[in-house]
Each structure stands twice: as C-alpha cells, then as structure tokens.
Amino acid sequence: TELRTTPAVSAIPLEDMDRRHLLHPHQWGASPERTVMVSGRGCTVRDVRDREFLDVSGAGNWACQVGHGRAELVEAGARQLGELAYFSGFFGFSSDKAVELAARLAGLAPDGMDRVFFTSGGSEGVETALKVARLFHHRRGEPDRTWIISRTMAYHGATYGSGTATGFPPMQEGVGPNLPHVVKVSPPYPYRAQEMYGSADVTGYLLQELEETIQRIGPQRIAAMIGEPVMGGGGILVPPDDYWPRVRELLSRHGILLIADEVVTAFGRVGSWLDSPARGMAPDMIVTAKGLTSGYAPLGAVLFRDEIAETVAGGDAYFFHGHTYSAHPTACAVALANVGVLEKDGLIERAHVVADWFREDLAGLTGLPMVGDVRIAGATAGIEIVTGPQDATPVMAGAVTAEMRHRHAVILREYGPTVVLSPPLVIERDEVRRTAAALTDVIERLR
Ligand code: PLP
C-alpha cells in the first residue's frame, strides 16, 4: 500500500487552511472569502498574495490609532519580552509597567477616578464593570439592585454578561439563558427619530422611556446603566448634546450607576483621550480597550471612581475577580509606548483634522440617492445606505465594503446598513480623498 503523505504546511495555500481550521470572530460559518494579512506600515497592509490595501478600518476593528508598524511600540514590546514577559498580577504581585500605566491612565481620567483594573480586552472589561456595579450596591446594603439597563443597537462584547447587554438579538439566540435582569431602552438615533420615536424630540422621548423603564422595574432594583458615549457598532450614532447630561441626572436621582463603554471612543478615536466626561456622562466607571494599545497587544482597562473601588474592595472588603493576564507586563509596556506616541505626535488633536477632512470629502456623498445619512464623530464616520431618496429603508452595506476591497483595495467595515470609516489617526489627506472617491464610485454602481 502507498504511504499517504502530508504536504508541507507551506505548500497548502494559507487561505484554504484558514477556511478549514480557523473560526473567525463574529463570522463563524459566514462568507468563505479569506484575506490573510501578513504585514502593515502606516495605513497600508499587505496580504499573503502580496496585495496591498489601504486600511481605513483601524486594523478591521476600530483600533490601530498610531498606524501599523510603529517602531516605538515594537521596541517597547520586544524590550519587555526580554526583561520580564509576564508575571501574574495576583496576590500583591505587579510589574513596573502595570503600575506606571495605571498611574498614567488615572492622570488622563477625571478627578476622583484614580483606580484601574486591567483585562485582556473590552468584553472582560464590561463584564468586570457589570459585576462591580452589582457588588457596589450589595456592599452598601442594597442587594436587590441587580438590574442593568442597556440599549438596543449597543455593542458591549461577546461574553455572557457583555453579550446580554449587547443590543443585537442574534448574539443571544440559542445560547440562553442569558444574564438575567438586563433591560433595554432605545438608542439615540436622530436620523430615524420620526420612525423610531414618532417625534423629532430625541432626548425628550428617550428620557421619558428611560424614566418609565426605571419605574416599571423599580428604582431600588437597578444597579447601573451602561452606554457607549457615541455608539460604534450601532453605526456611529451620535446623541444630541443634552442626552447624556439629562440621562446622568435622572440616574443619579435614583441612585443608579453609569458605566461608560469607551472601548471604541477612547484614545483619540472621537477626538479626546476619554469622550464620556466631555459628553456630560460623569461616569462612575469607564471601560477602555482597543486604542489603549492601538491593538498591538490585547489589553483593556476599567477606570473606577475612587468611591466605587473603595466600596467593593476597600478596608476589609475583598473582591474575588481577576484574570491570568490582568495587567500583563508586555501588554502594559506596549500601552505605555502607545500613549507616548499619541501624545508626542499630537494624534488626539489630529483626530479633529481627520474629522475636517471627512466633513470636506464625505459631505458630497449625501447627494447620492442611496446615501441616507453621513455621521462624523472625530476620526470615525458612518455612511448609512438606504433604498433611495423617497424611501429610507436600510440596505445592508456588505456589498459596499466588499466592492471597496475588491475594486479599490480599501478596507472598511459595515455595521448593518452603515459603512464605517475608522482609520489610523495618521491617515494622510490624499488617503481620505482616495477613500471618498472610491466610495462615490462604489455607491453609484449600487443602483
Ligand atoms: N464595547 C464596545 C463598544 C466594542 O465596540 C467592543 C468590541 O468591538 C467591545 C466592548 C468588546 O471588546 P472585545 O472585542 O475586546 O472583547
């Protein structure tokens, strides 16, 4: 009998191996198309077939603030791997890099928000914040405050707690029972105000709905509300200016905590280190990830108001919660280098410049019949695709992003009907122009 031989790994096309072996986040069993990336510099990435793409997505996922291949981050990571790659953060141990980063983040946070817990990403951070919210009330003698308010169209992660807080029902289907005691209210969606609220008064409608929801559940039974300052996965939904201050005031009146999910918005994406304080959220906790390391290492950070941290874990109180990779020294070293580059290169300010270029170049898209709305928040923008000027029925935007990739070698993401731009903050003027021209071409061909 003939011996069966296994071809050398290098002889098997990587794309086929990918299809066969690799389960992709959020795309288990979805499209068979594969683009296997191998390198990147600035806003340019290259795949295994040596095709070059313009990355206007932030490494596909709202990350990569400093651009690909930044030497400072590479060197910081390599140096730390050599010094001390990893040491547990459990039981009194820490690392110089974790301590420095915690202090650095406390310095960026509002006054009185000096405590930081590190995770491996956004979902773990949201999970942590939800637990802390319940525990805070429990420690203060209100154990019935277990309910969490979140919003439809919100994205908060894929673990059980964060996935239940997420407002996309497919994430909860068939894997239940999900986290109990989570209730959803409507998101601020000014473009669809009439059809969603029957009124142009977005904040008025949403405040009334929130108050009714609080009364229905019972104010004494609610631990916290969680919300993204600007909703990312919902399609760049920017709230009216008075929305968050009024939500905060209502929650405070009922003793309900507010968790700002800044996994997308922080570290310059929408134009500031942290967006929630500027938007009037006055949050009790802030969850960050992505831009914290520009995606160069998996890391999240949850910032706590001192009173929250001291209540759950001050004095004799002990909170049994943590992860093997909490405060991972190499990830923290990379984050410190990333924060250093954001500051040194003025990239937070540059997000405003990118926003101006978006305003100049994307404004014209609203003249296309299938563009319903263009929403810009700092260095991210959403273009909502609809059936036509007379009928704003949403059209799933996958065809736009696929054509942008195939026809123009530009990588964008779509979230339902919204095409999202979220480039590295180092994107150049002509790269924004090229993206806008390609979008015009692709969207015009849709009809
Ligand atoms: N929160 C928001 C607003 C997000 O956009 C995401 C991910 O996209 C998460 C949380 C979850 O973060 P991760 O995927 O790192 O777990």
Image (cartoon, helix red, strand yellow):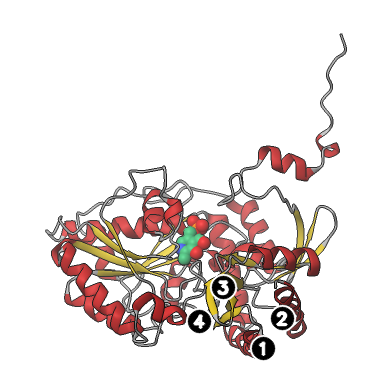
Label ID, residue 339: 3
Mark 4 vs mark 1, CA separation in Å:
27 Å
Label ID, residue 272: 4
Mark 3 vs mark 2, CA separation in Å:
29 Å
The picture places residue 102, in percent across and down from the top left corner, at 44, 66
Q: Amino acid at mark 4?
A: Ser
Q: Amino acid at mark 3?
A: Val
Q: Would you place residue 267 above or below residue 47 in this image?
A: below
Q: Mark 2 = which residue?
A: 436
Label ID, residue 52: none
In the displayed structure, does residue 13 sit left or right of residue 230?
right
Number of the front mark, 1 or 3? 1
Q: Amino acid at mark 1?
A: Gly
Which quarter of the figure is the C terminus placed in? bottom right
Badge 4 crowding class, 10 Å Cα cut-off, few under 14, some 14 to 19, many 20 or more, is some
Label 3 lies in ligand 1 vicinity (Cβ under 8 Å): no
Extreme residue in the right direction: 2
Mark 2 vs mark 4, CA separation in Å:
24 Å
Q: Amino acid at mark 2?
A: Ala
Q: Tell me if label 2 and label 1 are in contact, CB under 8 Å.
A: yes
- Of mark 4 and mark 1, the one earlier in the sequence is 4
Task: Find numbered disc 4 in the image and state the secondary structure of the residue it sits on.
Answer: loop
Q: Tell me if label 3 and label 4 are in contact, CB under 8 Å.
A: no
In the displayed structure, does residue 217 sit left or right of residue 391?
left
Badge 3 crowding class, 10 Å Cα cut-off, few under 14, some 14 to 19, many 20 or more, is many
Badge 2 crowding class, 10 Å Cα cut-off, few under 14, some 14 to 19, many 20 or more, is many
Task: Find numbered disc 1 in the image and state the secondary structure of the residue it sits on.
Answer: helix
- Of mark 1 and mark 3, the one earlier in the sequence is 3
Q: Mark 1 = which residue?
A: 364
Number of the front mark, 2 or 4? 2
Task: Name the one closer to the observer, 239 or 11.
Answer: 239
